[in-house]
Structure formats: C-alpha cells, structure tokens
Image (tube, helix red, strand yellow):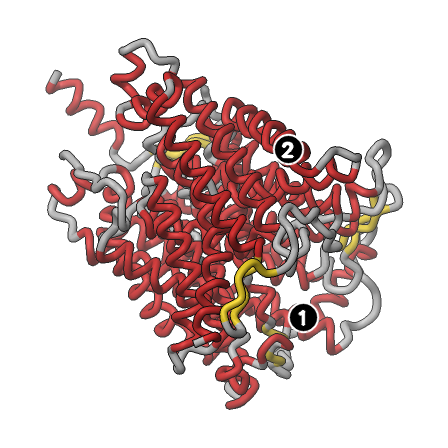
Amino acid sequence: MASRFTFTKGTPQYRNYRIGVWALIIAIFLLIGFAFVDVGSISIGSNKYNLSLIRLNKAIAYGVAILGLQVVIGYTGQIALGQSFFFGMGAYISAWLVADHSWPFLLTLLIVVPSCFLVGMLCGLPALRIKGLYLALLTFGLAALFPTLIKLDSLYDYTGGANGKLTGYKFKAPSWLPLDEIAQGLQTIPLLGSFFGDGPLSSREESRLWKYILFAIVAGICFWLISNLIKSRPGRAMRAIRDNETSAAVSGINLAATKTISFGIASALGGIGGTIYVAEVGIASPDDFSSLVAIYLIVGLVVGGVGTLEGAVIGGLVYALIPDWASSTQSIAFVPERWLQGPTGSLILGILLIVLTLFMPGGIATAINKAKGRFVSIKAANSDKNSESVAQNS
Amino acid sequence: MDLFLQRLFDGLTNGSAYALIAVALVLIFKATTLVNFAQGEQAMLGAFIVLQLWNWGLPMWVAVIVGMLISGIIAAGLERTFIRRFDPADHLPLVIITLGLFLVLNAVAAIVWRYDPLAFPQLFPHGSAITIGNARLSWYSIFAFGSCILVLLLLHVLLNRTKIGLSFRAVSSNLESSRLCGIKVGPTLQFGWALAAAAGTFGASIYAANPVLQIEPSIMLRALIFSITAAALGGLDSLWGALLGGLTIGFIQSVLVQYIPFIPNEMTLTATVVVLLIVLTLRPSGFLGTKTVERV
C-alpha cells in the first residue's frame, strides 16, 4: 500500500508534520470547546443529542481512567477489572478534602495520586501469585464492594453515606485568560460565527470552559507521561510480561516489581480520573462507582483499542456519550418504544463489546491508524542504513 | 443459642443458593477453563423464562424444567457463536465476551420485564419444618439444600457414569488428546455450557423462590460475587467444592460477620472478598480443586 506522504523520523519535515498535527488537534479541541459551551445539542429527527461540555469533561475523566486500564491490561496483560474502585477512591478523597478541608481541587491530586498508587500496589501484590482469571475474579469483587464500603455508617462523616458527598467548589477562570474575548472574536467570523453562540459568555459558561481546558491539560500530562513510560525501559518490561511471562523472567525482568508498579500506575490514573469526574459533577455518590462502571470502563478500553493510547481517548468518548445518547433517543422508526426506554445504553455497549472483540480486536484506534497509513507513512530514522547492512550480511 | 441456630439456618439457605450458581460456574470452568461472568445473568434470564411460562399457565415444576431446557439451548447457541472461535488459553477476549454478554442479557431482561420486582412462584411448601426454641428452619431451607444435593448427585452420576460425561471429563482434562481420541470437542463443550445454564437456571429459580425475595433483573448481581467466591473457595474445578464453598460463604455471611464485633453488618460483601483474597493468595486451588502445575 503506497502512501501519499512519507516522512522519515529525525528530519525537519517530520518535525514540522508532528507540530502541524498537534497544532491541528489543539485547535479543533479549543474550537469544540467554544462551539459547545452553550448550546451543545444535535437534533436528528425528533431526538435531541446533547454534546455539551459536561459530557466532554466526563469523557476526559473516563479517558484517564481507561488510560490506567491500558497500562495494566493493554501493556502488562494482567486482567484487572476493578478500575471503578480506584475511580471512586480518587473521587471521594478529592471530595472529602475539598468539602471538609477546603483544599483547591488540583492540589488534592497530591494526596489522590500517592494513596491510589499505594493501594493499587497492595492490590497488585496478590497478582504475583494469582494469575489470569483468578485476578479477574478478585478485582471484580473489589469493584463490587466499593459502594458498600462507602455506605458504611462508620464512614458517614467522611463520605456522606448513600446521599453522596457534595464538593461545593466553584471553578473560576483566571482573569488573565481572555476566554470571553476569544468567544466574541469567533462569533464575528462570517458564516461560521453562529456556531459559537452569541453575546458574551456567562460566568457559568466561562467556568465550564475553564474546567474543560484545565482537565484536558491534566489529562494531557497523564497521556504524555504514559506515552514516555511505554517507550522506556519499564514500559518495555511491561510489554515483555504481556507477551510471555516466562521469557520475560528469563530475560532478567523483575516480574514482581514491574507488575506491582503497573498496578500502582493504573490505580493512580484511575484516581486522577475520579478527581476529574467529581470536579465536573460536583458530587460523589456511591452508585456512580458501582461494578457496572468497572465493566463500562472495560467497554471503553476494548472499543477504543486495547494497547493503544489513542484508544483511551476514544474509549472515554464512547463511555461518556453512548449511554447518554441512547437514553435521549425517544423515537426511531420501526423500533418499538419499549426498547428505547429501558437500559438501551447498556445494551448497545454490551453489543459493541462483543462485536468489536469478534470482528475488530484492535478497536477503533487500530482501524483509524490503518486508515491513516494509507495517507501518511513514517519511516524509522536510518532505516536505509539498516536495510543495507542486512543486505550485506545476507 | 436460638439466635445462633437461626443464623446457622439462614447461612444454610443462602449457602445452598450460592452453591447452585457456583456449580454452574464450575461446570463451565471444567470445560473451558473460563470463568463465565455472564453466568448469573444467564441464570436470571432463565428464572424469568420460568416465571413467564408459569404466568402462561404451566404447572410450576413443568415451567422450571422447560425453562431449564430453553436456557440450556440458548447457552449452547451462545457457546457456538461467541466462545468457540477463541483460543481457550487466551483469557482476555473470553473474559471480555462474557462481560459483554453480562451487559446484553441484563439489559434485555430489564427491557422485556422492566425493573419492577415480580413475585416468583412458591416452589416449596410454606412455614417452618423444625422449631427449636425460637429458631425456625423453614421448609424452603430444607428443600433448597436438598435440591442442591440432588443436583450435585445427578451431575456426579452424569459425569462419572455416562458416555457423554466421560467425554466431558476427557475434554476438561486434556483438550488436544481427547480430540485425537475422536471425541467431538466442540459439541462436548457446548453440552457443558447447556448443562451449566440449566443448573444455573435451577439455582436462580430456587434462589428467587425464597419467600422473602422477589425477582428483578438485578437479582443476581450480588449473588454472582458470592457464587464466584464460593466457586473459587471450593476450587474452581470441583463440583463438591462448590457446595462446600457455597455453604462456607453462607455461614460467613450469617454467622461469622454477626459475631465479630468490629465488622459492621453491611460488611458481608467485604468480608467475602477478603476471604477470597486470602484463599487465592494462600491456596489458589481452593479446598478441593486440583493444583495446577505449570511446565516451562
């Protein structure tokens, strides 16, 4: 398959290409933010589909949690199903610190990350003896027990029991950020301006937009760190364990340390996702972190693509949007209403999970990468030299 | 003393129900070394089919048997379409498929029967059979335990005394060799799935027939965790281990948690998971399971 464009790593053209792609992604990201800050719904037929920033912010939260699953399932190959436990743990620690000790939200990450990391490592310890299915059983149990732990009477003062814990925290955009001016500027663009609403941003819209940008920066840092981790020595050790545990051990990889650390990192990311989630929603309630959430996160992982970083982004979007859109679909021709009123979202996610595992094991990310490969191909640096030396040897 | 007896009886009741679902899990694990996360939902769906048949006027035990047959056929179909094409040694896709089935079956049941709790036919006579002081052992508990033993005996005979049971055991012991001996591996595994689903449906029917319970789509969510723990506790490949594990979990729930003061009442689930953790760490093969030896 010949591609239209070929770039070689290490050349200035390649660098420009990378910068261009990232600039495009950031620009689209910001434009979406400004476009959907106020209206945010698409109408198809008589159904209205919301695409507001609230959902996109949730998608960012889920995306970070799924990134954690990528580390432990996608790259280390340990079947851990309990991500909702750490998602909830991060959410509750943040909510507690913000509500009762009036910490600023982002600072709570200083507590959330280490504590989730430690608890995750502790949960990873049995993984040294327990493998495959047994691990899946245990972590599933962990996910199931989280809501009951939260509802304990003795923890009521910290967690608010079944009612949930309100954070009561308002995000306020810093005054140096010209969000309002940019919005107004975008509205003056001929033809397209109407997509960006009209009039100045209300304080609510401004804070929503600020949250969107802030969460994206936090998530971006997580993705950047993990992408570096995967390419580095510990990351290669993780992938070696995934591919063949025995040969990894023979190659001198410390199985115990690598596995527990990957559990710890995954849990810390789950915690960060939980913090973002509760920062968006404003309340941590026990049912938001049930074992069903753990399964939905797995759906996001699989639909996005196991073992790809882009998969986590796509998975977050899938989890945040599909159940929501399914429940806002009130009428489709030829489908009886009964099928639209029940838990249609969970039905669709389940079907997606099965269909993708059967027919597209790489998930959406792999399909996109394949399609991209038709247009752009990237060669490794010095690939010509290598092929020459191979030719000489043979 | 009365209280203790009563709790013991409660443990017996719950334990028998968990054991029946655990038996289904064990059957599938024996066949395919896979833990079927959708087992609870399959059983729930089966119980709903039983309820529907009963509503249509079938006598209740006929409804149970027909329901078991139907859910067995559904399970055989599921095995053929979704499970057989995967490599049994690669756990991740299989776990994901069963999680997908879990979501789909749960949603379908909720769409068809809604979330309102429905009354399930009373399979057993009312009232208490034995009264010791204030402790009552209800007929339901006796029959639940009895039918649990009955199912296990039947399965024991089926697996150890019949031809199909022999081929089932051959497949679960060594898939490749049994294929070489001319055993049709696929249909045998399919049979295992059908058998498991039928056992699960029976278990869910017994569970839902509890006079204090009503049936609704999420009835098995909690029970699944207890049953999985029961199966793992007894050893995932041992039928009688499932009974032992189920009763242990039942007693942990009703006796142990009640008598240890620092564990609050709502902690049964946590206590169960902790027990699971301890057992898996110290003795991964459970009480009665066969130890796996890995060759490198």
In the picture as drawn, the residue positioned furthest to the bottom comes out as A101
Q: Quadrant of residue A54?
A: bottom right
Pointer 2 residue: B67
Q: Position of residue A8 (x, y in %)?
A: 35, 35
Mark 2 or 1, closer to the camera: 2
Quadrant of the rendering where the C terminus of chain B is positioned: top left
- Residue drawn at x 73%, y 47% is A326
For residue A300, side relative to residue B232 (left or right): right
In the picture as drawn, the residue positioned furthest to the right comes out as A46
- Residue drawn at x 32%, y 23% is B171
Q: Looking at numbered disc 1 in the image, what kind of residue is underneath it?
A: Arg
- Residue drawn at x 44%, y 60% is B250
Q: Is residue B251 above or below residue B258?
A: above
Q: Position of residue B128 (x, y in %)?
A: 59, 61
- Given residues A178 and B185, the one toward you in this image is B185
Q: Which mark is residue B164?
A: none
Q: Quadrant of residue B88?
A: top left
CA neighbours of label 1 inside 10 A, class few (<14), some (14 to 19), many (20+): many
**Chain of residue at mark 2:** B
Q: Looking at numbered disc 2 in the image, what kind of residue is underneath it?
A: Gly
- Given residues A198 and A265, the one toward you in this image is A265
